[in-house]
Image: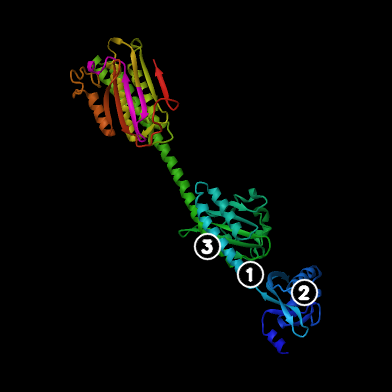
Amino acid sequence: MNLRLLLDSNSDAMCFLDRDLRLLAYNRSFLLLFFRLFHVRIDEGQDLVEQIPREARGLWRERCQRALSGKSFSLEEQYRVDGRSWYFEIFLTPVDVPDQGTRGVSIVAHDITERYYGELRTTRLAGRLQTLLESAVRLNSSIRQPQQIYQDTMALLAESVYFDTGSVQLLEDHHLRVVQVWGFSRPEKVVGLQFPLDRRFPNVFVLEEQTPVAVEDIQSQYPFFLTEEGRYESAHIRSWLGVPLIQEGRVVGIFTMDRSRVAPFSQGDIQVATALAHNAAVAIVNSQLYQQLLAANETQQVLLRELHHRVKNNMQLVSSLMSLHAEDLHEDAQEVLSSLRTRILALSAVHESLYNSELLDRVNLVSYADQVMQEVETGYYREERKLSFHLEGPPALECLLDRAVPFGLIVSELVLNAVKHAFPSGQGGVIKVSLAAATATSVRVTISDNGVGFTSRSAPGDGSAGGFGDDPGRRRRNSFGMTLVESLCSQLKGSLQREPVQGGGTSWVLEFATGLVCSGEDSSGEDSESRSDT
């Protein structure tokens, strides 16, 4: 009697078996547990193993024999009772049976169901927190692709909360539009659907209250889901959850989760979904802002391109008018107008390059130099002079727009000077422009000819006579062309040097910073392009 009272005071289920596995003693907890698990009433003297289901007898007999051999051990067991799982930690220990002088077995079953579910909840919570952390990075890394954000939102939800079907719905004017679905057998019938903002749908309450709305049985509370199932693909929906997408106090949409049976969403489900909704809302708004910036930038690009096109046309019109008026002027005045017209066309070439370029803040130097040389060639070339024009340089060499204009005018002036003064008496020759990267951020431009040499011709200008005379370092201060070149070089914060050419001729070397990283170090080789006109 005292042993029974002692055993009954313990909440764990306890029993003692003899060497034949017959019950010697047990407490009330063991009696109740055995009946709950196996629906069998037991009593002292019975073979315990024979009272459990047949398929488990061999396993339990082996366990008891192991304890009888002197081994103490424990194990965890799961049992299903009335649709619920119960978890136990079971200890088997060898004991001495005083009355028999033999060894028996002590079995103690400790209910760990609450601990198990607590650990499971902790594990799930850790997994959900990890999902939330990953979602912030994953969603915001896709702002250039809004559809990817919607897909990732549903995928992340499915990793954290059980549901059969779901959708992302964005608020547009006076309705919610479905932009992404999950789990629907015919997604093409659901994507694009619009839900009006009326009280036949629970969606509107999510927007109005700016809080999650969970519906235990949608068909009983919102029969419209059933009567309009052909339109909304909603016949399967029973339990429903809607969560608002809120960014800085503004609702941008909702996402919904459906279950095909009545299984209400738990508070934990709602909390996780709400946290995910916050991350999704931030990513969606960022994506919308990005798309708006792209559209605004595209509009600006179109306007700037049109502006450059009109400026180019206006400059060409001015050039044409100057050509018409020059026909009625004497030769010296025609020469001045021709030089001025060449400078105007050099400016026009910049705007033409920008009009045809994808990037409006930079100019391709080789392409631009080619246009400038063509304008000079067109305006001054005479067949009987047999001049040849050459251009070479890396095709990807570029500079910022504010540096392209002075560059083009300098090239125009120096090429023009060579055309007018390097080859007197109609003799032929070569005028060459070479471009190369001088450093990672600067360019070297060489304008050279094989003419009579600089000391015997005028300085760059608009036709004025004279040169450096006996002192090559002394420039003519009354030469407009040289003054313009000096001013433009100063504007570029660059350097301009005249270098001798072996065998005769003149070479000017201009170096300036492009404002960009240059694409190459050398103007020769596979990365260069060249043009030669005769």
Contact flag, marks 2 and 1 (Cβ < 8 Å): no
Q: Which residue is mark 2?
A: 38
Counting other residues with Cα less than 10 Å from the Cα at mark 2, is it few (<14), some (14-19), or many (20 or more)? few
Image location of residue 89, percent across then percent down: 67, 72
Residue at the outermost front position: 101
Numbered tag placed on residue 116 in the rendering: 1
Query: Disc 1 on helix, strand or loop?
Result: helix
Query: Disc 2 on helix, strand or loop?
Result: helix
The disc labelled 1 sits on which kind of residue? Answer: Tyr
Q: Quadrant of the C terminus?
A: top left
Mark 1 vs mark 3, foreground winner is 1
**Is 15 part of what is drawn in magenta?**
no
Counting other residues with Cα less than 10 Å from the Cα at mark 1, is it few (<14), some (14-19), or many (20 or more)? some
Q: Give the Cα distance between marks 2 and 1.
A: 22 Å
Image location of residue 197, percent across then percent down: 56, 58
Q: Give the Cα distance between marks 2 and 3.
A: 53 Å
Name the one closer to the observer, 160 or 213: 160
Residue in the picture at 60% in, 62% down? 241
Q: Report the side of 246 relative to 486 (left or right).
A: right
Numbered tag placed on residue 355 in the rendering: none
- Residue 195 appears in the picture as rendered: no
The disc labelled 2 sits on which kind of residue? Answer: Phe
Q: Which residue is mark 3?
A: 208
